[in-house]
Image: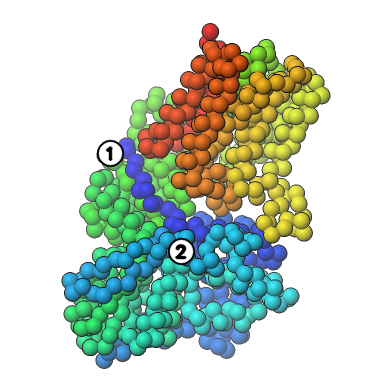
Amino acid sequence: MRVIVAETAGFCWGVKRAVEQVLSLARAHKGPVCTLGPLIHNRKLLSQLEGLGITSVTLDDLRGDKGAQATGVKPAHGHSEPPDRACRDGEPSASCAGSVSESPSHTGEEMPKQVRHDGKGGVSESPPYTVEEMPKQVRHDGKNGIPGFHSAAMETMASASARDRRLVVIRAHGVTPQVMDQVRACGVAVHDATCPLVRRAQETVKKKAGEGMDVVIVGDRGHAEVEGLVGYSGGKACVIAGPAEISTIAASDVPTCAIAQTTQDMEIFQQSVAELAKIRTCCEAVDTICGSTKKRQHETRQLAKQVDVMVVVGDRTSANTARLKTVSESAGARTILVEDPSEMSVSDFAGVRTVGITAGASTPSWLIGSIVDRLHHISRQRSGGMTRALLRALDLLVHANVVAAFGAACLVFATSRFQEIPFPAVAATIAALYVFSMHTLNRYVDRLVLPASEEVGSLIYRRYPVPILVACVLTGLAAVATALRLGWLPFVLVALSVAGGAVYGVKILPPTLSGLFGIRRIKDIPASKDLSTAGGWAMLTAVVPFAATRTDAGARTLLAFVFAFVLVLIRSTMLGMRSVQRDIIVGRETVFNVLGPRGTKIALALLISVLAAPLVGLALLGDVSLALRLGIVLLYVVLYIGLQTAKILPHGTPGEFVIEAQFILCGVAALLP
């Protein structure tokens, strides 16, 4: 069964920005951090945020029930706007009653495009407004001391009441001006994380309403973003769900402006504008639908025409996720909306050959990965018994880090040939024990965000956490104890490496020393996971074997260290790239999370060039034969990176094995005559 994932599935730029801002603020702020209403509508991600102490509050929570009742303030997801009324007699009014049950994907790389109606129901576009052009105060560029935390928020924090050190984050949906004033009146620090695209839509509504124009919003009644837009019109905007509701608006010559909720379907908006132009002779349309939403919906339509079944991944309370399901069904595809991999069964895909996957903007990519893993598991369930058994065995060996441990031993053999020293079997054993211990510990810590499919390797970390933790401790201690056989220097190097891995996620620095950057542990350093993994491997596979046999370090030792470090860094970067931001909720630990897709591809190209340098150096030192043999590894790396870029590399465990196999190939290449 073939599985095709839409390119834009998952977090859009705006949602990713909001999550990163909240995480940065949580590290920097010395008091509780909370959001006014759910940050995004995805229960799994919200649960993880709560685990980090980031909670959701309402105005009732901030002011107290008595104060809220006295002022008539509703909870954060419902505001005191005028009741639902239709636009009649040329006088637009609010139509945004009801509680919020949806979360929009209201962000993207393009800003609104303002045009005049062309008389044909179309909406033309002006040049895009890029992220780089956004005002500094709403950018998440990390240039204001605390990433995503601008000076206005810092001033607000400084003036906050000492008795309430809470920092309240306004989520990306935005709020009405009245609600913003009420939050600030509560005496808490406030950080406005409203999406810049939503902010521009708010400003458009405010401007047009101020010019005396009727404002018609094409969107979902009761939606938090729409309520905010109505608030910026002074409560006078009219909300319609689509062209069918144009009949509720009276014909008039009053100048009218139509805008869209940022996650609205472009076709619905265009149809609404065309119908509105029939009853409003002076009608202006401002396209406020974000670029990523348009692209996601377009990809969904195209993909739905190519597959047997479409799977839409996301929370059922998410507006943009529900809209994707509608878009897919309108394209003629049988569509399934799922929140969790466990909702899919083998019977759902009986006779299915091709499955398409798309996801709402509030869906974390690790969840999409879990869905893909589950689909591949279902596909394997339909395979023969022998094939299924072999794949389950491979999954266990890879996810239990047996393959990685064996690869470390093979890399020791290659680096020993690099340095012209006898193969140190004891050092190879130490490297294997170290890699097994540290990588298993890492998976143990991240066990709650590992793919939730029914794979053997993933399930063992959830079902047997205590035995796994014991295995981590015992193999780590075994590596240190075995190093005593090699001398005091190898012992110290191994002990420091194991200790560094053990305290990776431990808060070492006190809050008073963490500074503005909020770094208290190694894990908080950007790209720390990939860099520390490469450093640990290189130390155990290149330096320790040398320290156990010789004391006169030279050029060959340096070349061996660089070769091992870069090869492991490529491996870690590739795995991070394949996991597609799975670690976003725990910080910026991987190269992929720091650089993004484009930056990671550039970094990989540079790393390949650096990996070639030790081989060139080896040839210049006279060992041309070994340089050529290890050149096979370089070609192998280039090949699987190319396959990954072209999205041909197998998904899941088979693809991970292809990456891990580079170390086994190192041992084989070094063994060749």
Res. 97 visible in picture: no
Residue bearing the label numbered 2: 133
Callout 2 secondary element? helix
Above or below: residue 140 compared with residue 349:
below
Do tag 1 and tag 2 residues touch (Cβ < 8 Å)? Answer: no
Query: Which corner quadrant of the image does residue 355 belong to?
Result: top left
Callout 1 secondary element? loop
Q: Nearer the viewer, residue 560 or 337?
A: 560
Res. 546 visible in picture: yes
Q: State the image coordinates of residue 180 (x, y, percent, origin top left).
A: 54, 79
What numbered label is drawn on residue 353?
1
Q: State the image coordinates of residue 494 (x, y, percent, origin top left).
A: 74, 29
Q: Residue furthest bottom?
A: 89
Q: State the image coordinates of residue 96 (x, y, percent, origin top left).
A: 39, 79
Residue drawn where x is 34% and y is 41% of the image: 3
Q: What's the distance in space between the residues labelled 1 and 2, CA to CA? A: 45 Å
